[in-house]
Amino acid sequence: MSLFALMTMAQSISDDTRQIREEFQNRKFGIFLHWGIYSMLADGEWVMHNRHIDRDEYAKLAGGFYPSLFDAREWTKLFKEAGAQYVTFTSRHHDGFSMWATKASPYNIVEATPFKRDVVGELAQACREQELKLHFYYSHMDWQRLDYPTGGCQNCPHDPATTNWDSYYAFMNRQLTELLTKYGPIGAIWFDGMWDHKEKDFDWRLEEQYALIKRLQPKCLIGNNHHGSPIGLEDFQLFEQDLPGQNTAGFSGEQKVSQLPLETCMTMNNTWGYSITDKNYKSGDELIRRLVTAAGLNANFLLNIGPRPDGKLPDEAVEILKHIGSFMKVNGSTIYGTRGGCVPPQSWGVTTQKGKTLYIHILNKVEDGQILLPLTDQKLAKVVMFADGTKLKFKREKEGCRIFLPELPDTTDCILTATLK
Ligand code: FHN
């Protein structure tokens, strides 16, 4: 099927699809987890590739992986307290190690490690208890399997003699079938790694794979971090380390912001997988601002944590989650279930909107005690401080509506609630 046909298929969607996409958009905030045997080397999830580690030597790490302090319930309780509504877990990253009891390969947490526990199963159960949706990250690229036809990532070279695309493709679909039949309802499959093959004629046979996912779980969303505009049955568009419309990290390429639900994923420090030396954490306030800005740009915010090899979350991550949680507890209603507001981002901040209610998030310093909402078609009926309901004065002008602010409290996000006429 041509790219064109795939794109055309994306135009017509059923009411059910519309509904699950909207529910996803309403959730707004998720936790991304990059966890695998690479955490033992404590140098990020690309360590096998970056240090040119031989595949057989790397595989021996599994024999020592025993995250004795892992407690899925403790993790999910914290995620819930932080205000997250879903969790995206690396079921299998580029190193090819599977974090569940897959029958498709012995290279998995139950068969290859002394830990022998199905981490995916435990997480699925804990997510259900906390009513968090579970999404699975799944790598299209594999540095370990000999049947994977290596593309651009040449540090783990594969012998062309053993390459067998049909066998690799069948393996992936078998694994996806397990993930979608053994662990209850799954919110989304989050693909990554397709960019390993830049050749235009490399056929990932996505349409068949996506159809398989929809057949097994019609309510499972599909997202693909291929760094391009969405194709085929994809339900949401991904942005890595950038908000929609930006490309500071270089992953957004030529992609245009689509009409699909949007999701920005971001690290707390600089690394996805656990790194013992990367202490370059953004502050909790900074991450709150990014979450709110994402909401103002109509996007979900997927915040990453790289758990330690002992199964604990890094202390810094725990502190940050608690900080975000105290913000979301008080202000979550201005974010959950909203869409990007009718006022586009301004120098002072962003807006989110639910029906006729416009939430004005002042994230940056306002110099002269007033802000202008460039609203020409719509009028305001009322503006109050979200925190205590204090009424604010405003005036209609040619360029929009000017709101006069009191002395603003020194908060991360000062929120006003405006009612549109
Ligand atoms: O290579 C991966 C990387 O390890 C990480 O998983 C991120 C998450 O968005 N995605 C890839 C790079 O695009």
Image: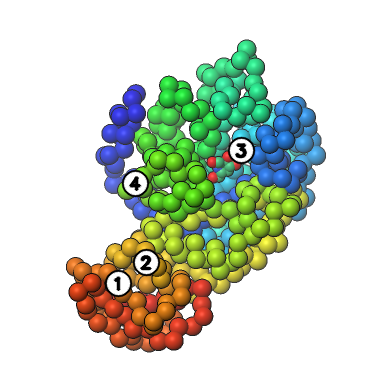
Quadrant where ligand 1 appears? top right
Task: Please give the label number shown on residue 346.
Answer: 2
The residue at which mark 4 appears reads as 258
Asked if labels 2 and 1 touch by Cβ distance under 8 angstroms, the answer is yes
Left or right: where 412 falls relative to 117: left
Q: Is residue 332 left or right of residue 318?
A: left
206, above or below 221, in the image: above
Q: CA distance from mark 4 to mark 2?
A: 21 Å
Q: Give the Cα distance between marks 3 and 4.
A: 27 Å
* Residue 93 - label: 3
Residue in front for this viewpoint, 199 or 176: 199
User: How far is mark 1 from mark 3, CA to CA?
Assistant: 44 Å
Q: Amino acid at mark 4?
A: Ser
Which mark sits nearer the N-terminus, 4 or 1? Answer: 4
Q: In the rendered image, which quarter contains the N terminus?
A: top left
Q: Position of residue 266 (x, y in %)?
A: 54, 53
Q: Quadrant of residue 333?
A: bottom left
Q: Which residue is mark 1?
A: 373
Say what secondary structure mark 1 lies in: strand
**Label 1 sits on what residue type?**
Leu
Residue 77 visible to an observer of this rendering: no
Circle 3: element type: loop
Percent x, y of residue 60: 78, 32
Q: Between tags 4 and 2, which lies in front?
A: 2
